[in-house]
Image (spheres, helix red, strand yellow):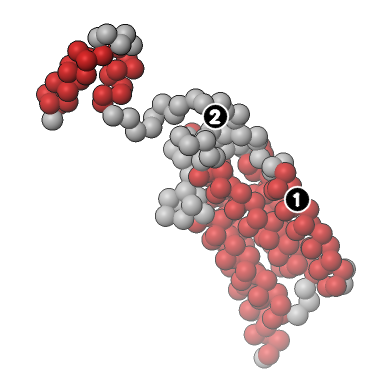
Amino acid sequence: MNRYKILSWIALFISISLLLLPKYVPICTGHTGDGNPMQCHYTYQAEFIITLLAIILSASLLVLRTTEARLLASFVVFLLGIIVIILPQPWAIGICENGACLKTTFFTTIGGSILAIIGLVLLLLTHKTQSEEVI
Amino acid sequence: MTLNRFLVLSLFIFSLGIVILYNGLNRVPLRQIDPNATHKHGHSSLLQSEAVANKTTTASATALRLKNIDIIQKRS
């Protein structure tokens, strides 16, 4: 099994972990003054959709055969990793100052960072392979 | 696995995820709140908060109001 396959499996595992994270490290369950859920609820609803997409794209890295398709998929995985980090930021959607939300965001940020790094490494690996093929 | 089969499987997984999201199975359920309960950290005027804290009868309401106005003047 080459490095590309190993990294693709790791990306898939990280994406699944990010999807299941709020279930095992839950965010707060409070409401705002007017009875609506707090912003951390909406952040993690968005995170769920993004990580769902990350799972599909990470799995596609194992299925795709052409270098161009692999380049595109790894680039999108990289972007999704960045989006995962950005969503809980106060200038995006944000989270509340509750300890539970901060804990979940801490793990989300670590997972998103790893996903982005893997996406970037896969991008470079595929680019290198493409260059070697051309030569 | 062929790409076509992967796309069908992905579509199924994505739809399943959206159904899970819709039903709220992806998270811990939100706390049930009493719709009539007031939020403790909301904006309230000094007149309201002082009046609630003192719990006076209607007879002494005017005196309390004057007292509250005095408190506001002192604070400002």
Whether B17 is drawn above or below B6: the answer is above
- Toward the front, the furthest residue is B59
State the image coordinates of residue A129 (x, y, percent, origin top left).
68, 79
The residue indicated by pointer 1 is: B19
Same subunit, labels 2 and 1: the answer reads yes
Q: Dot 1 falls on which chain?
A: B
State the image coordinates of residue B4 (x, y, percent, origin top left).
85, 72
Image label count: 2
The image quadrant of residue A133 is bottom right
Find numbered disc 1 in the image and state the secondary structure of the residue it sits on.
helix
Whether B14 is drawn above or below A106: the answer is below
Residue B52 vs residue A82, the one in the foreground: B52
Q: Is residue A58 visible?
A: no
The residue indicated by pointer 2 is: B35
Q: Which mark is residue B6?
A: none
Mark 1 or mark 2, which is nearer the start of the sequence? 1
The image quadrant of residue B2 is bottom right
Q: Is residue B65 visible?
A: yes
Q: Amino acid at mark 2?
A: Pro
Residue B51 vs residue A53, the one in the foreground: B51
State the image coordinates of residue A78 (x, y, percent, origin top left).
59, 65
The answer to whether residue A122 is left or right of residue A40 is right
The answer to whether residue A9 is left or right of residue A98 is right
Find numbered disc 2 in the image and state the secondary structure of the residue it sits on.
loop
- Quadrant showing the C terminus of chain A: bottom right
Residue drawn 26% across the image and 26% down it = B46
Residue A92 vs residue B75, the one in the foreground: B75
